[in-house]
C-alpha cells in the first residue's frame, strides 16, 4: 500500500534541520567528524515500556524508510514538524510526546499506542488492535480454552520429531482427565521430548544453524580438505548448554568445550583442545566466552579482518537479537566511530551504525581470525600488529564499558535482550512465525521468568508451551 | 493513558486485512490465461557471485602502467600483457591468466576468456561502479538483492515477478545461496511472487509432478493415472470434512489453492520432462520420463558439457529452460561457497567462491570471474538463439551479476600473485541487456587508489574521487530497464536505453 | 599454485571426519510420569487500548509439518524406513531430493540456514510423491508378504465390492487403521464412506484391491491434517 507522508509546509527547511541534527556532526578530540544517531535510544528513554525497548533497543525504522539517503515515514515526517529549538537530544523527547495523540500513518491507532503495542506509528500496514490478555485465573498457568490435545500434538512434532500415535492419544485421554491432569501429562511429554534425540540432535541443530553459519566446503568434512575450522564444536556446545536444565548463560560464558560419545552423550572438555590442524580450540579457558569465542566463530566472522566488526555484529545479532545491519540495537557511543583502521566509517551514512558497531568490536580484535591452528587464539598484540596506531580504545556494550570479550559476554547475559532473544528463538522455532503484538506481551513474561527458572532453556520451553499461541487459546 | 481504537481505525485495519487476503489469493495469479496486456514479459536473471567479485580484477582493471600515488606498485593493477581491449569496446578486461603463465594455479583452472563475453555481448553490456554499504557477506548479499531496502524490503526478484510473472507457473525461482536466497521483507509482496527456492537444479524436475517417474513404467505398485485423479478428488472432499477447516489458516488455504490450481497446471505442462536435465546415467525411459527436448534441440550438452557434475552449469541450464518455457520471469542462481567437482576429481570453483581471495586474490578472481562470465555468455547465447514472435528472448532479458562487495586494493609491493585480500566496499557490477545502455562504463577507477569513482545517475558523468552510487542505484537500474515502478526509484537514466 | 596458496593449504591440513549423529526420534513413547509445574508469573500491566470496537486479527493458527517429521510420521505409520520408502529413480530418497520443497533447510550446502517460511509452489508435488510412493510400497509388501498394515482386505482381488458386507467390513477396518496410523484419529462415517467409494467403478475404471488400498492411503496421508498442526 502506497502512502503519502503528510509533509508539513515548511518541510524542506525543517527536513534539512532534522537531517543536520540526526546526523549531527561534532568534532572529536582528534578533530574527526562523527555522527550521533541517538534517536532510537532517546525514543526508548521516552517510552521505556515499548516492546521495541524491552530487551531491545529502538529501531531506526520507527521513523525512517531509509537512513541513507535519509527518508522518513509519515511518523518521522511528523516529527520533523514537531522538533523544536535546541539540541536534537533535548528537543526530541518533547517532540515525541507532542505526537502521542496523533495518528501519523492514519491507520486508526494513535502514535503512542502503536509504540506501546509494538507496531510502527509510521506504517499504516502495521496496526494491531490489542486487548490486554486475561491472566490465567485458575491454578494452572494457561489461559481458559487452552487446547491440551493440540498442544500435545505440537509438543510431539516440534520436540519429539513425530506426531503422537493414536494409542498415545488414547492414553492421554484416559480417565476423562481434568485440566490439571492434562496439564501434567502434557508437560511430562514436554520433558520426555526435550530429552529425545529428535530435539537434542536434530532440533537444536536446526535452531542454531543461522547463528553458527556452517560452510560445508571448509568445515571438518571439507571435500577439498581445506578446513578453516570445525563448527561441530559449536553445535555440541549449544546442544549441551540448551539441554538438561543447564544454565543458558553458558552460551556466552562457557569456558569449556563439549565432545560427543558414540552413544550421543555430551561431555565437557576442560582446558585447551590442541590439534596440529585447524580443528582444535586453542583459546585459553579464562578468555573463553562460549559461542562467541570458538575457533569457528572467529574463522567465519573475523576471517582476516584487523578490526572484526562482523564478529561483534554477529555476536550482537545472534545472541542479543539485534541486527545492526537492519538498524536495530543502535546505541551510539560518544566520540565514535573513531575509524581506527581508516575505513572511512566516519562518513555520515556509515557513522550512524558504526558509532555503535565499532566500540562493540574493539575487544574482539585480540583474537586471531583464520590463522591455521591458531585460529581463534588470543594475542594481545594482534590489534597493534594489524592496525597502525592502535590505541586500544574502550569497548562498549549497551552503554557500559567492558574490558574484554569475557566482560562483554558477562554484561550481555545480564541484559533483558539476552533472555528475550532466547525466548524469541524458541518461539519462532516452535510456531514457525513471529509473535503478534498480543503474543509478545505474553512472551515477555516468559523471558522475564528465565532467572527464576534457573536459567534453563527447558523451563523456557515449558513456559512457551503454556502460551496462548502454542495452546490454541488465542 | 486511555485511548480508543476508533472506527476509522478499524476500517483502516479491515482494509489492510482485505488487502492481505487479496495478496494470498492465488486464483488470478496462477490462472492459466493470456496476459491482459500485450507486452511480452521481461526476464530478469540474477547471478549471485558469492564472496566478493571485484570489478577491478575483471572488467574494470587498473593498468599497472597507469597506477600512481605514493605506492603505485602496492595497488592491485595488471600489467599490459594481462589485459586486453577489443577495438571499439569500452571494456578493458583481464585475460585468462592460465594462458599467460602468470598467476594461475594447477589446482584451480581458469577456463574462459573474459573478452569472449565482451566480444559476443559487449554492445549490450554495462559496467557500473558502486560503493557498497556492508562487508558482511550475508548482509551484503541481501542488500544486492533488495537495493539496501530502497523498495521497502522487496527483492528485485520479487519485484520482477510481480511486474512480469503474473500468471506464470513459477514466477520467481531462486537457486542461489546465502544472502542471495533471503526473501524480501515487504509485506505487500503476494505469495505467488515470492521466489521458489531450489537447492538442486538436477533434481528439481521431479518436484514438478506429484507422481510421474516414481516407479518404472508398468510397475505393479503404481495405480493407474485416472484412478490417482479420483483419489485426489476424494481428498478434496475429505478436506472439507477436516477439523482444520474450522481454523483460520492462510497457510493451509494457500496450500489447498496451490494443490487445486497450480499442481494440475504444472503436471499438464509436463514440466518433469521439459525441465529434466538428466539425459544419461539413468534409464529415464524405463520410468516413463524423457530428457528436456531442449537438450538436443539447443545442443545443451555442448553448451554445458559438465551438466550433471557442475552445479553452476546445471543452474544456468535450468534458468534458461525456465525462461524458454515461459515458466518464470525472474531467476537467481550463482556459485555459492560449496565448490563442484567433476568426475575426474577436478574442482571447478575455488572453495568458498570469490571469498577464497583471502588466500589467493589473483587466482581466485581470475578463476571465478571466468566461471561467471562463461555462464553469462552461455545464457546470453541461448537466449539469443531462442526465437519469439517478435525477435528473441534476449530482446527482453536482463542479466545482473550481483556480488557482495569488492576486495582490498593493495598487494605486497610488486607481487603478481599469492597474496590475499580482505573485503572492501568499493566495487562495481556487470549488467547485460539490450534494454540497457550497452558498451558503457559508468564510473571508473582512480589511478592513485584503485578505488572506484562514482557517476552521475542522470548524465553518466564520472565523479572523480567520489562514489555516491549505492545498492539502491543498482536496484534502480534493473527496475528501470524492466519497467518496474516503485516510489523511491532513483533516476538512473544514464544506464538505461 | 602460488607459494602462498600452497602454504595456506599446507596449514589447513585435512582433518578427521566427524560423524554427525542425526535422526528422527521415533524411539520413545509418551507415557507421562510426573513433572514440575511452571511457577506463575504476573503479567505486566496492560497498556490501555480500547478493544471494544475491533477484534484483533487471528494470526496463523497452524504450523507446517516439515520434511523430517513428515517423513518420520509416514514411515512410522506405514512401518517403513524413511530413507527407502520413496526413492527418486530408484536411488535417491525423496525426502532428501525434495528436502527444501518439503520445508527443510540446507545449511551445509547452499547456506540455506533458515528454511522456507511457508510451503512453496512445488510442495504439493513433493508431498504427493513421498506419500504415494510410501503407500504403494506398503501395499505391495502387505500383498506379497505377511500383512502389517492392511491386514483385512483381500489385496489380491481384481476389484472390491463395497456393497458386499464382508468386503466392506474389511475395507472399513483397513481404512480406519490407515486413518489412525496416519492421522492419529478415527475417521467420521462421512470420511469412511468417501474412502470406501473409491473402490467403485467410475469413468470406465475399476480399481483393483491394491489400487484401492494405495489410493486410500494416499488420500489420507496427503490431507492437510497430516501436513499442518
Image (cartoon, coloured by chain):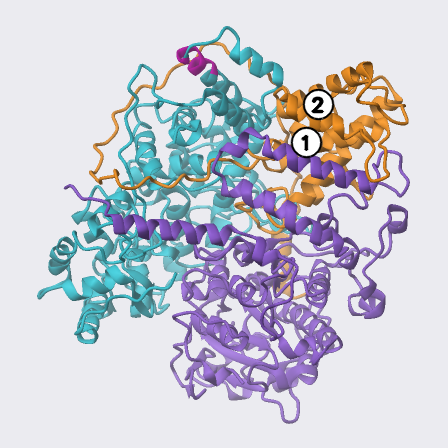
Front-most of residues A412 and B204: B204
Residue A181, by quadrant, is: top left
Colour representing chain C? orange
| Residue C82, percent from left and from top | 71, 31
Colour representing chain A? cyan
| Residue B67, percent from left and from top | 50, 85
| Total numbered badges shown on the rendered structure | 2
Q: Which residues are magenta?
A: A179-185
Q: Chain of mark 2?
A: C
Q: Is residue A433 visible?
A: yes
The residue positioned 64% from the left and 50% from the top of the image is B261
Circle 1 crowding by C-alpha within 10 Å: few under 14, some 14–19, many from 20: many
Magenta segment includes A181: yes
Q: Which residue is denoted by mark 2 in the rendering? A: C178
Colour representing chain B? purple
Q: In the rendered view, does B442 fall on the left or right side of C183? A: left
Q: Chain of mark 1?
A: C
Vertical side of A407 occupied by B128: above or below: below
Q: Quadrant of the N terminus of chain B?
A: top left
Amino acid at each position: 500500500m502506497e502512502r503519502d507522508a503528510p509533509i508539513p509546509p515548511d518541510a524542506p527547511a525543517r527536513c534539512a534541520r532534522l537531517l543536520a541534527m540526526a546526523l549531527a556532526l561534532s568534532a572529536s578530540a582528534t578533530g574527526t567528524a562523527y555522527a550521533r544517531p541517538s534517536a532510537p535510544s532517546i525514543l526508548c528513554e521516552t517510552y521505556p515500556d515499548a516492546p521495541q525497548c524491552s530487551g531491545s533497543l529502538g529501531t531506526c525504522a520507527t521513523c525512517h524508510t531509509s537512513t541513507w539517503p535519509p527518508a522518513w515515514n509519515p511518523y518521522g515526517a511528523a516529527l520533523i514538524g514537531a522538533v523544536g529549538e535546541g539540541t536534537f537530544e533535548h528537543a526530541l523527547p518533547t517532540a515525541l510526546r507532542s505526537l502521542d495523540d496523533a495518528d501519523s500513518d492514519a491507520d486508526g491507532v494513535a502514535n503512542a499506542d502503536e509504540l506501546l503495542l509494538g507496531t510502527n506509528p509510521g506504517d499504516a500496514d502495521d496496526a494491531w488492535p490489542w486487548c490486554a490478555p486475561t491472566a490465567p485465573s485458575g491454578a494452572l498457568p494457561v489461559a481458559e480454552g487452552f487446547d491440551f490435545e493440540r498442544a500435545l500434538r505440537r509438543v510431539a512434532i516440534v520436540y519429539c520429531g513425530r506426531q503422537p500415535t493414536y494409542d498415545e492419544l488414547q492414553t492421554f485421554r484416559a480417565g476423562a482427565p481434568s485440566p490439571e491432569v492434562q496439564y501434567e501429562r502434557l508437560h511430562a511429554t514436554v520433558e520426555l521430548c526435550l530429552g529425545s534425540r529428535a530435539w537434542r540432535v536434530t532440533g537444536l541443530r536446526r535452531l542454531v544453524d543461522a547463528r553458527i553459519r556452517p560452510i560445508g566446503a571448509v568445515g571438518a568434512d571439507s571435500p577439498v580438505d581445506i578446513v578453516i575450522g570445525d563448527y561441530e564444536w559449536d553445535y555440541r556446545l549449544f546442544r549441551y548448554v540448551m539441554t538438561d536444565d543447564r544454565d543458558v548463560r553458558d552460551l556466552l560464558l562457557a569456558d569449556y568445550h563439549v565432545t560427543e560419545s558414540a552413544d550421543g552423550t555430551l561431555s565437557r572438555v576442560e582446558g585447551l583442545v590442541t590439534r596440529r590442524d585447524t580443528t582444535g580450540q586453542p583459546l585459553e579457558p579464562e578468555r573463553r566466552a562460549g559461542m562467541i569465542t570458538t575457533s569457528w566463530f572467529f574463522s567465519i566472522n573475523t576471517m582476516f579482518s584487523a578490526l572484526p566488526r562482523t564478529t561483534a555484529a554477529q555476536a550482537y545479532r545472534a545472541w542479543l537479537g539485534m541486527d545492526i545491519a537492519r538498524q536495530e540495537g543502535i546505541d551510539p557511543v560518544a566520540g565514535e566511530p573513531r575509524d581506527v583502521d581508516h575505513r572511512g566509517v566516519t562518513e555520515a551514512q556509515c557513522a550512524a551504525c558504526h558509532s555503535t558497531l565499532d566500540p562493540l568490536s574493539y575487544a574482539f580484535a585480540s583474537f586471531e581470525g583464520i590463522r591455521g591452528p591458531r585460529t581463534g587464539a588470543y594475542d594481545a598484540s594482534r590489534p597493534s600488529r594489524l592496525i597502525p596506531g592502535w590505541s586500544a580504545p574502550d569497548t562498549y556494550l549497551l552503554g557500559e564499558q567492558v574490558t574484554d570479550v569475557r566482560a562483554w559476554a558477562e554484561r550481555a547475559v545480564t541484559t533483558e535482550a539476552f533472555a528475550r532473544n532466547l525466548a524469541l528463538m524458541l518461539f519462532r522455532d516452535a510456531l514457525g512465525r513471529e509473535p503478534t503484538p498480543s503474543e509478545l506481551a505474553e512472551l515477555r513474561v516468559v523471558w522475564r521468568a528465565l532467572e527464576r527458572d534457573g536459567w534453563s532453556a527447558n523451563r523456557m520451553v515449558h513456559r512457551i508451551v503454556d502460551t496462548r499461541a502454542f495452546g490454541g487459546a488465542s | 493513558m486511555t485511548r480508543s481504537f476508533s472506527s476509522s481505525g478499524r476500517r483502516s485495519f479491515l482494509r489492510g486485512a482485505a488487502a492481505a487476503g487479496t495478496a494470498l489469493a492465488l486464483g488470478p495469479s496462477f490462472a492459466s490465461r493470456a496476459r491482459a496486456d500485450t507486452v511480452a514479459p521481461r526476464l530478469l536473471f540474477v547471478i549471485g557471485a558469492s564472496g566478493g567479485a571485484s570489478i577491478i580484477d575483471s572488467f574494470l582493471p587498473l593498468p599497472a602502467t597507469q597506477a600512481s600515488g605514493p605506492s603505485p606498485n602496492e595497488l592491485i593493477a595488471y600489467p599490459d600483457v594481462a589485459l586486453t581491449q577489443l577495438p571499439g569496446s569500452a571494456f578493458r578486461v583481464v585475460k585468462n591468466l592460465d594462458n599467460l603463465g602468470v598467476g594461475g594455479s594447477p589446482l584451480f583452472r581458469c577456463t574462459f576468456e573474459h573478452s569472449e563475453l565482451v566480444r559476443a555481448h559487449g554492445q549490450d553490456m554495462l559496467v557500473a561502479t558502486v560503493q557498497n554499504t556492508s562487508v558482511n557477506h550475508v548482509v551484503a548479499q541481501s542488500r544486492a538483492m533488495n537495493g539496501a531496502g530502497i523498495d521497502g524490503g522487496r527483492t528485485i526478484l520479487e519485484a520482477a515477478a510481480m511486474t512480469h510473472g503474473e500468471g506464470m507457473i513459477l514466477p520467481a525461482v531462486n537457486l542461489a545461496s546465502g544472502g542471495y536466497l533471503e526473501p524480501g521483507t515487504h509485506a505487500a509482496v503476494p505469495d505467488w511472487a515470492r521466489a521458489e527456492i531450489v537447492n538442486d537444479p538436477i533434481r528439481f524436475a521431479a518436484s514438478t509432478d506429484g507422481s510421474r517417474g516414481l516407479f518404472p513404467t508398468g510397475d505393479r505398485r503404481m495405480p493407474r493415472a485416472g484412478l490417482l485423479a479420483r483419489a485426489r478428488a476424494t481428498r478434496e472432499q475429505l478436506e472439507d470434512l477436516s477439523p482444520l477447516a474450522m481454523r483460520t489458516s492462510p497457510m493451509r488455504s494457500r496450500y489447498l489453492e496451490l494443490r487445486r490450481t497450480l499442481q494440475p497446471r504444472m503436471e499438464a505442462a509436463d514440466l518433469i520432462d521439459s525441465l529434466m536435465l538428466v539425459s544419461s546415467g539413468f534409464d529415464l525411459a524405463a520410468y516413463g520420463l524423457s530428457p528436456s527436448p531442449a537438450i538436443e534441440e539447443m545442443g545443451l550438452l555442448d553448451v554445458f558439457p559438465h551438466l550433471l557434475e557442475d552445479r553452476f552449469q546445471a543452474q544456468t541450464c535450468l534458468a534458461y529452460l525456465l525462461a524458454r518455457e515461459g515458466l518464470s520471469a525472474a531467476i537467481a542462481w550463482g556459485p555459492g561457497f560449496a565448490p563442484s567437482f567433476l568426475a575426474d576429481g577436478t574442482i571447478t570453483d575455488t572453495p568458498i567462491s570469490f571469498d577464497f581471495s583471502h588466500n589467493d586474490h589473483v587466482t581466485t578472481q581470475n578463476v571465478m570471474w571466468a566461471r561467471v562470465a562463461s555462464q553469462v555468455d552461455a545464457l546470453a547465447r541461448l537466449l539469443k538463439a531462442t526465437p519469439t514472435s517478435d525477435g528473441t528472448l534476449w530482446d527482453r532479458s536482463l542479466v545482473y551479476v550481483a556480488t557482495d562487495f569488492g576486495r582490498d586494493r593493495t598487494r605486497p609491493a610488486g607481487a603478481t600473485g599469492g597474496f590475499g585480500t580482505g573485503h572492501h566496499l568499493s566495487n562495481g557490477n556487470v549488467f547485460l541487456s539490450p534494454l540497457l545502455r550497452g558498451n558503457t562504463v559508468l564510473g571508473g577507477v582512480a589511478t592513485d587508489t584503485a578505488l572506484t569513482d562514482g557517476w552521475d545517475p542522470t548524465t553518466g558523468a564520472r565523479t572523480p574521487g567520489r562514489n555516491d552510487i549505492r545498492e539502491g542505484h543498482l536496484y534502480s537500474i534493473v527496475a528501470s530497464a524492466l519497467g518496474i515502478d516503485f516510489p523511491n526509484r532513483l533516476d538512473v537514466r544514464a544506464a538505461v536505453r | 599454485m602460488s607459494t602462498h596458496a600452497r602454504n595456506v593449504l599446507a596449514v589447513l591440513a585435512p582433518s578427521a571426519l566427524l560423524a554427525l549423529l542425526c535422526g528422527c526420534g521415533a524411539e520413545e513413547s509418551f507415557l507421562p510420569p510426573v513433572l514440575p509445574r511452571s511457577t506463575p508469573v504476573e503479567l505486566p500491566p496492560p497498556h490501555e487500548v480500547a478493544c471494544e470496537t475491533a477484534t484483533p486479527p487471528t494470526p496463523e493458527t497452524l504450523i507446517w509439518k516439515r520434511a523430517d517429521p513428515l517423513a518420520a510420521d509416514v514411515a512410522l505409520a506405514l512401518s517403513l524406513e524413511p530413507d527407502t520408502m520413496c526413492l527418486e529413480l530408484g536411488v535417491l530418497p525423496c525426502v532428501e531430493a525434495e528436502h527444501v520443497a518439503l520445508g527443510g533447510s540446507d545449511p551445509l550446502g547452499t547456506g540455506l540456514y533458515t528454511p522456507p517460511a511457508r510451503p512453496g509452489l512445488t510442495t504439493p508435488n513433493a508431498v504427493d510423491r513421498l506419500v504415494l510412493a510410501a503407500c504403494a510400497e506398503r501395499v505391495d509388501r502387505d500383498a506379497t508378504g505377511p500383512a502389517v498394515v492392511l491386514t483385512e482386505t483381500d489385496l489380491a482381488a481384481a476389484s472390491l465390492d463395497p456393497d458386499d458386507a464382508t468386503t466392506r467390513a474389511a475395507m472399513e477396518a483397513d481404512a480406519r487403521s490407515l486413518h489412525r496410523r496416519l492421522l492419529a484419529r478415527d475417521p467420521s462415517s462421512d470420511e469412511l464412506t468417501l474412502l470406501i467409494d473409491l473402490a467403485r467403478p467410475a469413468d470406465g475404471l475399476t480399481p483393483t484391491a491394491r489400487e484401492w488400498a494405495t489410493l486410500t492411503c494416499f488420500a489420507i496421508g496427503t490431507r492437510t491434517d497430516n501436513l499442518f498442526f
